[in-house]
Image (cartoon, rainbow, N blue to C red):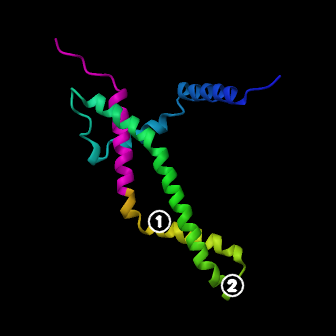
Amino acid sequence: MRVRWGRSSAVVLVALGWGAWYLGYFAPLYRLVVWFARQPETWNAFRDPESGRTDALLMMVSFFLLTPIVLFIVLLALVFVLIVLLLLTEPFFRVLRLPSWLCVPIVLMGSAYAAWIVRALWLPQVLYVLGLTAQAGLVYFSKPPPIPR
C-alpha cells in the first residue's frame, strides 16, 4: 500500500490552517495587513465605486502571480553577485594565509550590510507594493456597498 504524501499533507495543512483561522491565530496577521493598508500613499487606492473591487482583484492576482517570478530573478541575481564577490575576495585570503572558508561568511555579512546601507532605495517601493496589495485585499474582501434603487 503506497501512501500519497502530497494529498495527505495538503489535507493536513488545509485542516490546520482552517483550525488556526477558526481559533483566531491569524488576528495579528490581520492587524499587520491593516497597518500596511493604512499607509498614506495607498489610502485612496481602489476607492472608485464602479471599478474599485475589480481593480483590487486584478492587483491581487497580479501580485500573487508575479511575486514568485520576481523573487526567483532577485535570488538568481543575488547568487550571481555573491559568486562574483567570492571569486574577487578569495585571492586576498590566500595572500593573507587565512582559511578560505572565512571568505563566505565575510562576503555574506558584507552583502547584508550593503543591502542595509542602501535600504532607502528599495524599502519604500517594497512597502508601497505591500500596502497596495493589503489595501486591495481589504477592499475586495469587504462587504460591497448596497446598490441604490
The outermost residue toward the right is 1
Which SS class for mark 1?
helix
Q: Say which residue appears at 66% left-offset and 82% top-offset.
A: 93
Q: Which residue carries the number 1 mark?
A: 115
Task: Name the residue nearer the viewer: 24 or 78.
Answer: 78
Q: Is residue 140 above or below residue 105?
A: above
Query: Magenta segment, which residues?
Result: 124-149
Res 123 → quadrant: bottom left
Q: Say which residue appears at 65% left-offset and 75% top-offset.
A: 103
The outermost residue toward the bottom is 95
Task: Name the residue nearer the viewer: 94 or 10.
Answer: 94
User: Which disc, if any, is residue 94?
Assistant: 2
**Quadrant showing the C terminus:** top left
Q: Left or right: 25 with respect to 97? A: left
- Image coords of residue 36 (percent x, y): 37, 44
The outermost residue toward the top is 149
Which mark is first along the chain, 1 or 2?
2
Q: Left or right: 108 with respect to 118? A: right
Task: Name the residue nearer the viewer: 7 or 23.
Answer: 7
- Image coords of residue 125 (percent x, y): 35, 54
Q: Is residue 85 above or below residue 14?
A: below
**CA–CA distance in space, label 2 to label 1:** 27 Å
Q: Amino acid at mark 2?
A: Arg
Q: Say which residue appears at 34% left-offset and 49% top-offset.
A: 128
Q: Is residue 107 magenta?
A: no
Number of dots carrying numbers: 2
Q: Crowding at label 1, few (<14), some or many (≥20) Cα neighbours within 10 Å?
A: few
Q: Amino acid at mark 1?
A: Ala
Res 66 → quadrant: top left
- Image coords of residue 94 (percent x, y): 68, 84
Res 5 → quadrant: top right
Q: Main secondary structure of the magenta part?
A: helix
